[in-house]
Amino acid sequence: MPNLLKSILGIATLAVSLSFAAPLFSQAAGLPDPGFKIVHGSTALLVTDPQNDFLSPDGVAWGVVGKNVIANDTVKHIDQLFAAAKANNLPVFVSPHYYYKHDHGWKFEGALETLMHKIGMFDRKGALTSEGFEGSGADWLEQYKKYINDGETVVTSPHKVFGPETNDLVLQLRKRGISKVIIAGMSANLCTESHMRELAEQGFEVMVVSDATAAAQLPGLDGYAAALTNFRMIASHVADTKSVVASIRQASTN
């Protein structure tokens, strides 16, 4: 048997044994799908930026992300992931985005950083005060508070650009013995994708929930389409919320 055929059969056998293993090759791109198995004790749910400025119609970014949030039913799907994780004792981590007064003194910024600072996105009065936080754009979406404020969810220090290089997420995950991360949240091609990339570089096994995120869609700039491409190329697996919730429940009974 040719070595190539042996390798393909070996990979296929491995894929069948994984909870999330889809067909070995994507019909669209011919890419292998390594799969992702939920293992209690080493798997966690990570939600990036579940905040009003992204997910509420009153948020300052709603004008550019709202259409995609509605199309994906993102708010509902993130809620379903939170609920499934909590009901099945899967650790939950939230990586928020906050800007304080001193962050507005930066001497240079990228395009989206400039925009976020200009519109006051994720602004807070300061790192040591909650004044004005309740109900602000930086606050959690109201329906998620019962999950995030339950005393069990790990809320990391804020990331400042897009990825977790500037916060303590990796430390918190490693200190909890987490090596496998299910990623959801906002926004798809910025913070969500940046977290996926950095966690993969840091040696974590990652998967992304495709309909529990959304992105800005502007003329000639489709952030969600860009993110889906990179999710598929970088993550171990990409799945929808229905599949992930079912697998979380199944893993808890094994």
Image: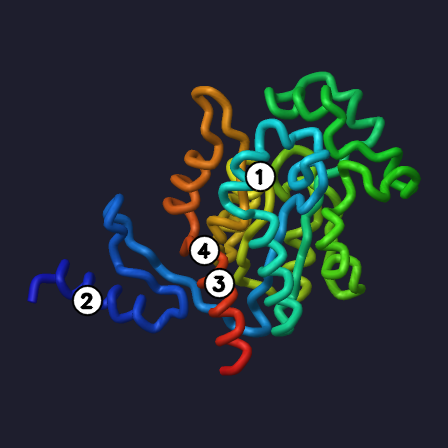
Amino acid under disc 3? Val
| Up/down of 160 relative to 182, above or below | above
Residue 126: quarter of image: top right
Residue 32: quarter of image: bottom left
Residue 34 placement, left or right of 170: left
Nearer to me, 25 or 149: 149
Amino acid under disc 2? Leu
Tag of residue 9: 2
Residue under label 3, please give it.
244
| Up/down of 158 relative to 46, above or below | above
- Helix, strand or loop status at disc 4: loop
Tag of residue 240: 4
**Are the residues at dot 3 and dot 1 in contact (C-beta closer than 8 Å)?**
no
Q: In this rendering, does residue 11 appear at all?
A: yes
Query: Where is residue 209 drawn, in percent x and y?
Result: 49, 53
Amino acid under disc 4? Asp
Say which label, 1 or 2, has the lower sequence index.
2
Query: Where is residue 102 drawn, in percent x and y?
Result: 83, 27
| Up/down of 22 relative to 221, above or below | below
